[in-house]
Amino acid sequence: MAKRIFATIKPEVLEWARTSAGFSIDAAAAALRLKREQVAAWEAGGEERPSIPQLRDLASLYKRPLAVFYLQEVPVRFQVLSDLRRPILGQDRAYSPDLTNEIRIAQQRRELALELRAELEEPVEPFSFRLGDEGVEQAGEAIRQFLGVDVDQILRFGSDSAGRLGFNTWRMALERSGVLVFQSSRTPQKEASGFALAYDQLPVVVVNRKDVPQRRLFSMLHEFAHISLRQSGVSDLKLDAIQVEMPDIEMRCNAIASAALMPWDAVHAELAAAGGERELTDDVIQQVARRFGVSRPALLVRLVNARRATWDFYFEKVAQYAAEFERELAARPPAKNIKRNVPQESISDLGRPFVGLVLGNYYQRRITLSDVAGYLGIRVKHIETVQQKMMG
């Protein structure tokens, strides 16, 4: 009978791997089909240790390389994010393993981007734009000027009812300014709309790809406001939620995002043209929101902050929109299986700057084709198509 080999690892590293992956002891034990007491004993610092096969199972569950478990101390490299989401039933909300993994992946991609820039001898300029305690209107104007997005551009977004023109225009502006913008497809919509990593170099914005483009646009500017205020954090922008339940920083970032996306003079002019000076009808709200490429709740946030509407009106309308959406959802035919466009998904999720860095290092033979596939999360067979789309 083969002798069982046990892993010589630090209990505190084992505990860190579990908690940083978003698992409780009970959840980890259930996933591994082990008793809770056994997992707890491994982390207690006594004589109990996992076997090598069990350690491999832990590495797979926690989505960590096996070598990580042999570190001599707990890593402290990455930022800790503030949980800026609203409590549920007055209790704090733990990050799910999916959300925890998305945060870790975003941080690792940023580290990789810094390394790839260094390999190409491309300097990384500090992200200098910063907001303070200025008024919301001034903050919104400062963001537009810094990103180079003017009112004429914004008012063209209405030509695209899908909302992609607005999202893509603002995203490219953020990326030109030195922000990495990623899209997450694994985080549930109800858990988080996005998060911000407010580093002084290559800050990161991540938005939930499961949201419609108009909602993603608002989330992206909300997270950019966090970066500009040097506040990392996770947000859940349910614009139909009671605003007073949100932390003050979330309220401020909502107001700044809406002011940046919708310059008030332009909003006022569009309201007048649509007859909104007399009454904020559903048609008026829909028409004006579409002009700016935003959702109706986002426009209502802007109107409330400008004292053009009340919170009571806001909540009445968002409840109406939610009911309409549920009816539309129930009436839709079953969704058809649509063939995935993996190369386009890779560019959309990672952004052209990041994909360009990876390909640039490959062209200079600093990394292999296998490295490219790993960094972009695709198979080697898709790389040629990615290259073509990047050049198109």
Image: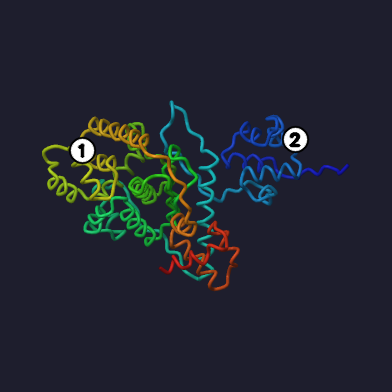
Q: Identify the image quadrant of the N terminus.
A: top right
Q: What element carries label 1?
A: helix
Residue 181 is situated, as x and y percent measured from the top left of the image, at 42, 55
Other residues around mark 1 within 10 Å, as few (<14) / some (14–19) / many (≥20): few
Q: Can residue 222 be seen in this view?
A: yes
Q: Name the residue under label 1.
A: 282
Quadrant in the rendering for residue 33:
top right
Q: Is residue 377 left or right of 129 when viewed as pictured?
A: right
Q: Can residue 139 be seen in this view?
A: no
Choose between 306 and 52: the one closer to the eye.
52
Q: Is residue 372 left or right of 168 when viewed as pictured?
A: right
Q: What residue is drawn where x is 18% and y is 42%?
A: 284
Farthest left residue? Answer: 278
Q: Is residue 374 left or right of 239 when viewed as pictured?
A: right
Choose between 343 and 22: the one closer to the eye.
343
Q: Is residue 198 left or right of 362 when viewed as pictured?
A: left
Q: What residue is drawn where x is 51% and y is 38%?
A: 95
Q: Of the residues shown, which amino acid type is indicated by label 1?
A: Asp
The correct choice, above or below, for 75 with respect to 367 in the image is: above
Q: Name the residue under label 2.
A: 46
Residue 70 is situated, as x and y percent measured from the top left of the image, at 70, 49
- Spatial CA distance of label 2 from label 1 is 65 Å
- The mark that comes first in sequence, 2 or 1, is 2
